[in-house]
Image (cartoon, helix red, strand yellow):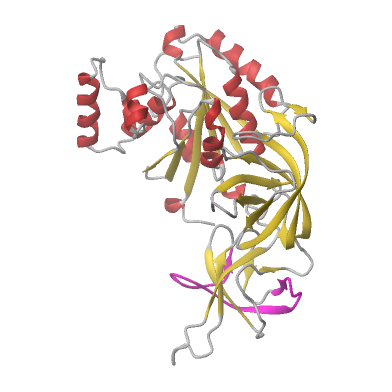
Amino acid sequence: MEDQHTELLRFSTAGSVDDGKSTLIGRLLYDSKSIFEDQYENIRETTARRGEEGVNLALLTDGLKAEREQGITIDVAYRYFSTPRRKFIIADTPGHIQYTRNMVTGASTANVALVLIDARRGILEQTRRHAFIASLLQIPHLVVCINKMDLVEYSEEVYNRIKEEFSEFSYKLDVKDVHFIPISALNGDNVVDKSTHMDWYGGSTLLYYLENVHIGSDHNFIDCRFPVQFVIRPNTDEFHDYRGYAGRVAGGVFKKGDKVMVLPSGFTSEITKIDTFDGEVDEAFPPMSVTLLLKDEIDISRGDMIVRENNLPVVAQDLELMICWFNEKPLQPGGKYTIMQTTQDARCVIKDIRYKLNINTLHRNEEDKVIGMNDIARIMIRTTKPLFVDIYRRNRNTGSIILVDEQTNETVAAGMVI
């Protein structure tokens, strides 16, 4: 569907503290020749100044001064690189428990989640947390990188033991595609180049996997969803009668001539034209940004949704959500918040807190109703007007929401419609 040269893969990296996430990204960038000489020189000098050996590739991504001083990752760092086959956006997310919210943010749009495991330490609480968040966010592909293989003498036995243990755990999660790769980020084994130390491993390198994993079907091409962002009325002589509805396709395939329905009004019409920045097209699908023109003059505004008559989203004011709480101030039961979903915003009230989830044991705590920063909980809300939603598992675009504090305008939670 998309030109092979422009396909974009987003991946997030996660793991426990000191598992080597930042080193791995540095290695990916360096070995795929995606960094500049002066950047390399800069980190070589910094490494030498710190009295460390070689070149500390982790310094490439840890941009915050506090991160460099403490040798940890605090905020989500986004890095962009490309190879002849694909473009990549990496979200390097922190491993500490107090940054769960940063991790949710970094991973929310990813196609692939990289989970790093230190071969010496095996599966930790953090590993489980990251795998769980990846499954919660319905990230389609999970790659488990068993790192620091150089420190366990590149042992196949160690690799197999960790692989087995992780597989057992991942069966409990809703993860469809799990892939394992033994690597040494420090020495570059199986990152971009095939390792000469692990002849027993017959699989691909990490970069090869990232370049070739099939992500075309990560979008929902079945349910047609087009949230209107903006109504285009140029009012010029040249485009005197032009009235287009601009937005980003959130699901399905829209074609010229299709019969469509507009929510909330329920009026129907037909698509007469699909415009894009590069000219007219015959069809539009996710994640394209397009302008739809309809046959009939219907009153349509931002927040309305163009769909197909025989395939409607759920139109509801009572929603059940799984949320990650972002704010220092805990969730107020009965509290009112602004809710944003696709191009709509409304107000909502928290009706009920069903349970808080212990992210490490996956245990549901129905007694403790205090939802503080980084907690994950299941709640019921009621909105002031109907929203057009799908369950998150069907559509990550129409199934996700954010809650905003009306007083401070801070985003206090991100959530998924269950």
Judge whether 7 appears above or below 173 on screen.
below
The residue shown at (53%, 61%) is 288
| Dominant secondary-structure state across the stretch colored magenta | strand
Q: Which residues make up the magenta segment?
A: 259-284
Left or right of residue 70, residue 304 in this image = right
Left or right of residue 154, residue 163 in this image = right
Q: Is residue 295 magenta?
A: no
Can you tell which quarter of the image residue 168 is in? top right
Can you tell which quarter of the image residue 143 is in? top right
Judge whether 408 appears above or below 37 on screen.
below
Instruction: Pick the quarter of the image with the N terminus.
Output: bottom right
Residue extending farthest bottom: 237
The residue shown at (43%, 9%) is 151
Judge whether 172 appears above or below 3 on screen.
above
On the image, the x and y values in percent for residue 304 come to 66, 69
Q: Is residue 263 magenta?
A: yes
Left or right of residue 147, residue 227 in this image = right
On the image, the x and y values in percent for residue 134 come to 61, 35
Nearest the viewer among 361 and 184 is 361
The residue shown at (20%, 30%) is 41
Nearest the viewer among 298 and 173 is 298
Nearest the viewer among 279 and 306 is 306
